[in-house]
Image: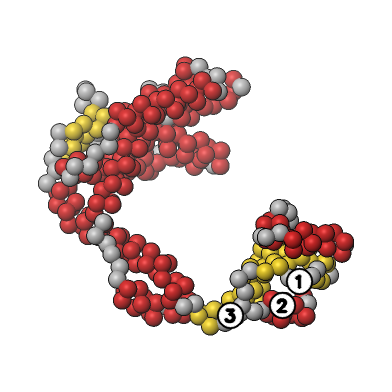
Amino acid sequence: MKKLLIAALMIMLFAVTAFAQTETLSGSGIAARVNGEVITMDAFLSKVLPNYTEISKRIEEVDPLFSEMLLNTEAGQKLLEEYERNSLEALIEETLLIQYAREAGIEADTEVLRGVVNKSIMDTLTELDIEKSDADLFYILKGYIDGLSSYEAKVVRDLAYKEVLNALYEAVTESATVTEEEVEQYYLANSSRYAIEEERANLKVLLFDSFSEAYSVWKAASRDANPASVLDTFPEVQSGSFTRQGIENLNPELVKSLFKPTNGELLSSVVTLDNKYAVIYLESYSPAGALGIDDVREEIRQILIAEKEDLLWRIWKEQEFKTFKEGAVIERYYETDGGE
């Protein structure tokens, strides 16, 4: 146990050292300001260090030489610096999106979220009988500088961002609609997608080594208003889609019983299948040809709605959000090259 703890501490030390080597901060612990709103150094490190700590551990396990190169070579340091820059830019982007949403009247209640997250964490610690000091050490080793409080703050930030992002996405894309004409055009343009090359019988099958076992189950199913539910009580029930040729290879006499229109039915007796005794429930039958537009209308509508929503979102990002971002006042205090 002591060796494992020492190893974990060393990994954490490597992670912190790698970042400290390039770290130049303002004295107030600020990573950046976005339109006057502060991104703290703790928020920045809580985004990067946990991922880096986990990556470092895995790399050390897989290839110690690569780990050594990452931590102790100029090329490795440049890679880490680029990761830091991209991580900070991602935080700035999130902050800008939250600010845009706020101006549009969309805002997460962070106090409520903080209460929910704190209660969840405390309840978990109580349930697992874990001391807060132990939890702090655990999260420090995971890369959260201030332990549990840093982890909690990151979870709250992530939840708030996701809540705002989802609400903003809905607001931007709410005008997406699909007409019946568009559904029909999509169906015609993608007709091959809805073609059924071979007729198929969709079955539930129970196989037995003895006729008496199979008959007992068939009898119970035949007396039930929902025969399929009786078959479903057996873990070994198999559900599958069979072609005509597939059934002919197993038992040609079953073709007429299975390849026909149906609303769902239990075959009228125990049958032989693949050298066993089978109880079969015919769920549905799909003739060769193509699915009709009525069969796929809702599926097509959902596809088209998703495409239109994605387009509206991309237009919003390229136009409105890009303009908002270009007009923002962004000050970066955390630099990897030692200067502004």
Q: In which quarter of the image is residue 98?
A: top left
Label 2 sits on what residue type? Answer: Ser
Between circles 2 and 1, the one closer to the viewer is 1
Between circles 1 and 3, the one closer to the viewer is 1
Q: Looking at the image, is mark 2 or mark 1 earlier in the sequence? A: 2
Q: Which residue lies furthest to the bottom in this view?
A: 289
In the image, residue 8 above or below residue 67:
above
Q: Can residue 223 be seen in this view?
A: yes
Q: Looking at the image, is mark 1 or mark 3 earlier in the sequence? A: 1
The location of residue 27, given as percent across then percent down, is: 21, 22
The location of residue 131, given as percent across then percent down, is: 50, 17
Foreground: 83 or 170?
Answer: 170
Left or right relative to 226: residue 270 = right
In the image, residue 130 above or below residue 161:
above
Q: Can residue 68 be seen in this view?
A: no
Q: Are marks 2 and 1 in contact (CB under 8 Å)?
A: yes
Q: Looking at the image, is mark 2 or mark 3 earlier in the sequence? A: 2
Q: Mark 1 points at which residue?
A: 268
Label 1 sits on what residue type? Answer: Ser
Q: Name the residue under label 2.
A: 257
Q: Quadrant of the N terminus?
A: top right
Name the residue located 28 percent from the left edge and 52 percent from the top edge.
Answer: 170
